[in-house]
């Protein structure tokens, strides 16, 4: 997909996120908006996925993903972003977004396989587990000699979990050079800034010390820079080391009043705030 | 049926916050730890008054449990707090080795337990924590039923020496217990005396049991309602005494049927006084997103479900 098209897709995704969270008066808009450009770029540009469709017109989804690139969302609370991208990409009806977080929905508060939503391969929400799962998937790709890339997105607050560092240790040990991890380095978490809550310090130096190659993405809300970083990461694969993209983003990016604060980590906008937000996010692909 | 009314609804986690605020004044050894969920745990008042007795641990629960054990060894009384899911299953081995087996005086105080956490869904709705904590040697397990009882339990735990798991929740619920109640760990509360059936309830299901008792009264069934706030140690005497009279039991809890209060009661009765039992709880399934009321209805955890089980169990007498 071309740059302009990717940008307008991301705008629609942002609209979907804000509308979904407003619709059920619950969920996490901040991190979702901040990671929108990355996840849009992955699904609409970077990742190789099975493009075949079923009789219902939706993309065929295989959990095993033989011959496909894979994406795992470790910071599962940004589920509205994941759901919007999956629906817009063609995995299921965009109308289903209106059921987000409501009873009997496939769009659970945090991503789940339990209700069989196409596009989801493992549940997430309890933080710190996604990189380990991505390790296993990347390991399997190697065993099967499949030439695909495994992507996993994590939060920066999430980097505080001990399991992350068990997984960070594992990937270089097994030379998982088909693995690209992305850290959403927005410097915010629930109780405040990550610097104040539990300082991550120099994530780049830490990953390097564990044996990873690193890519600095200075503005993860600039689509061109996102594409460049993904291309740079891809070029580093196959050299015996996993790659991490340290992605600086702005929590709430795209909605002015949700930016520059941790307050919108997990808060839903009211009617008035929704209107203000949507005025900043023109409808580009048609609302659900 | 004894009448229970309420003038306000509050969340049990606010009862915890209020209890902590009091402990901040009365108990200089009490400390609070949290893993990036300060507002959810209602710790703001405690932290404001006692900033040096609060430790922000970040999103690193396993470390938090270890730090709490270290503080306890030094003589502090740490309350390690997070969501119930992350303060039980996620850190089971840390609790087992560094806290329970080591006899460290750590209080694990957790919110957002059960289905009533609501929209966040099954990843966060722990329904197995009572089973895990009950099975751990030395662990005291408490699941209070309203704001006042949670506050009282929080305060009582500070003077109780030994590891404890205190479980409460997110939704606002009627406040119907005495604000000045004496909370005795391990001692059941007789909610209503009756003769036809014993309803043993814990946590958010106690209010539902009272509602059920009123519905049953209209049908001429006189229910004895016992609140077991301390799942472990279980007040065996209170249950056995009641069963002597009613000869049948319904248990009710916001937890899996496997391993929770109902199982504890069944174990007691099958050993000491075999009695028909029916159980209200989640039947071997995960939860899902929805409003608390929708979920309690869908998974059969409300007054109507208790009434139904009461009729079943009476027919088995
Ligand atoms: C194991 C675990 N502990 C705590 C939580 C509660 N929680 C949900 S999101 C969050 C903050 C995450 O911070 P970050 O990774 O920086 O994501 P962001 O706030 O930037 O979206 C916390 C503590 C959780 N989901 N899982």
Image: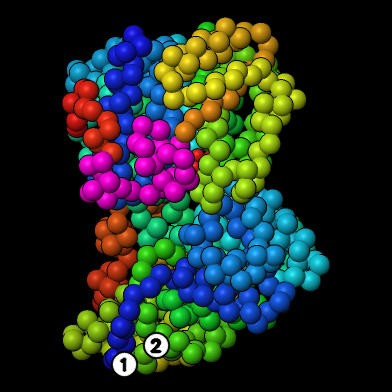
Is residue A108 in sight in this rendering?
A: yes
Q: Which residue is mark 2?
A: B191
Q: How is the image coloured?
A: rainbow
- In the image, taking residue B264 as reference, residue A106 lies left or right, namely left
Image mark 2: chain: B
Lateral position of residue A273 relative to residue A251, left or right: left
Q: Secondary structure at mark 1?
A: loop
Looking at the rendered image, the quarter that the N terminus of chain B falls into is: bottom left
In the image, is residue B99 above or below residue A169? below
Say left or right for B102 vs B271.
right
Which segment did they paint magenta?
Answer: A251-276
| For the residues bearing labels 1 and 2, Cβ distance under 8 angstroms | yes
At a point 71% along the width and 23% down the height, the residue shown is A208
Most extreme residue toward the right is B74
Mark 1, residues whose alpha carbon is within 10 Å: few (<14), some, or many (≥20)? few
Q: Residue B130 in the image: x percent, y percent?
A: 53, 64
Q: Which residue is mark 1?
A: B2
Q: Is mark 1 within 8 Å of ligand 1?
A: no
**Residue A28 at x, y = what percent?**
39, 43
């Amino acid at each position: 997909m071309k740059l302009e098209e990717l940008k307008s897709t991301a705008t629609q995704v942002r609209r979907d996120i804000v509308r979904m969270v407003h619709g059920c008066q619950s969920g996490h808009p901040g991190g979702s908006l901040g990671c929108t450009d990355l996840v849009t770029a992955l699904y609409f540009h970077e990742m190789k996925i099975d493009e075949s469709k079923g009789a219902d017109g939706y993309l065929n989804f295989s959990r095993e993903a033989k011959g496909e690139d894979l994406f795992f969302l470790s910071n599962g609370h940004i589920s509205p972003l994941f759901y919007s991208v999956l629906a817009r990409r063609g995995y299921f009806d965009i109308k289903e977004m209106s059921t987000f977080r409501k009873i009997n929905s496939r769009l659970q508060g945090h991503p789940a396989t339990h209700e069989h939503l196409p596009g989801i391969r493992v549940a997430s929400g309890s933080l710190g587990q996604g990189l380990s799962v991505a390790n296993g998937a990347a390991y399997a790709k190697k065993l099967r000699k499949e030439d695909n890339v495994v992507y996993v997105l994590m939060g920066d607050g999430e980097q505080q979990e001990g399991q992350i560092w068990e997984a960070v240790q594992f990937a270089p040990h097994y030379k998982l050079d088909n693995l690209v991890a992305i850290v959403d380095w927005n410097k915010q978490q629930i109780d405040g800034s990550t610097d104040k809550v539990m300082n991550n310090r120099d994530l780049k130096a830490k990953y390097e010390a564990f044996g990873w190659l690193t890519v600095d993405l200075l503005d993860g809300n600039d689509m061109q820079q996102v594409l460049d970083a993904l291309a740079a990461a891809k070029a580093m694969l196959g050299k015996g080391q996993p790659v991490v993209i340290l992605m600086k983003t702005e929590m709430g990016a795209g909605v002015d009043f949700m930016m520059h604060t941790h307050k919108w980590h997990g808060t839903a906008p009211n009617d008035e705030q929704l209107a203000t937000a949507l005025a900043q996010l023109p409808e580009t692909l048609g609302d659900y | 049926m004894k009448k229970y009314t309420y003038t306000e609804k509050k969340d049990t986690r606010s009862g915890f916050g209020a209890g902590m605020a009091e402990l901040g004044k009365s108990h200089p050894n009490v400390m609070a730890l949290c893993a990036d969920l300060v507002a959810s745990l209602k710790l703001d008042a405690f932290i404001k008054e006692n900033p040096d007795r609060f430790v922000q641990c970040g999103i690193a629960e396993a470390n938090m449990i270890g730090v709490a054990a270290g503080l306890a060894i030094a003589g502090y009384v740490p309350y390690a707090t997070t969501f119930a899911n992350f303060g039980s299953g996620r850190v089971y081995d840390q609790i087992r080795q560094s806290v329970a087996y080591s006899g460290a005086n750590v209080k694990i105080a957790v919110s957002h337990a059960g289905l009533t956490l609501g929209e966040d869904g099954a990843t966060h709705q722990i329904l197995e924590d009572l089973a895990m904590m009950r099975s751990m040697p030395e662990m005291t397990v408490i699941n209070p039923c309203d704001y006042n009882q949670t506050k009282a339990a929080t305060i009582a735990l500070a003077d109780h020496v030994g590891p404890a798991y205190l479980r409460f929740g997110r939704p606002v619920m009627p406040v119907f217990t005495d604000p000045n109640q004496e909370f005795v760990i391990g001692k059941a509360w007789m909610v209503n005396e009756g003769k036809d059936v014993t309803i043993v309830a814990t946590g958010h299901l106690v209010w539902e049991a009272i509602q059920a008792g009123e519905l049953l009264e209209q049908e001429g069934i006189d229910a004895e309602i016992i609140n077991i706030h301390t799942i472990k140690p279980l007040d065996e005497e209170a249950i056995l005494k009641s069963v002597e009279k009613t000869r049948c039991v319904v248990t009710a809890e916001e937890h899996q049927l496997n391993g929770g209060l109902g199982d504890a009661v069944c174990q007691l009765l099958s050993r000491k006084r075999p009695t028909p039992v029916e159980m209200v709880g989640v039947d071997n399934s995960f939860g899902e997103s929805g409003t608390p009321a929708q979920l309690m209805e869908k998974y059969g955890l409300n007054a109507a479900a208790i009434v139904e089980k009461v009729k079943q169990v009476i027919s088995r007498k």
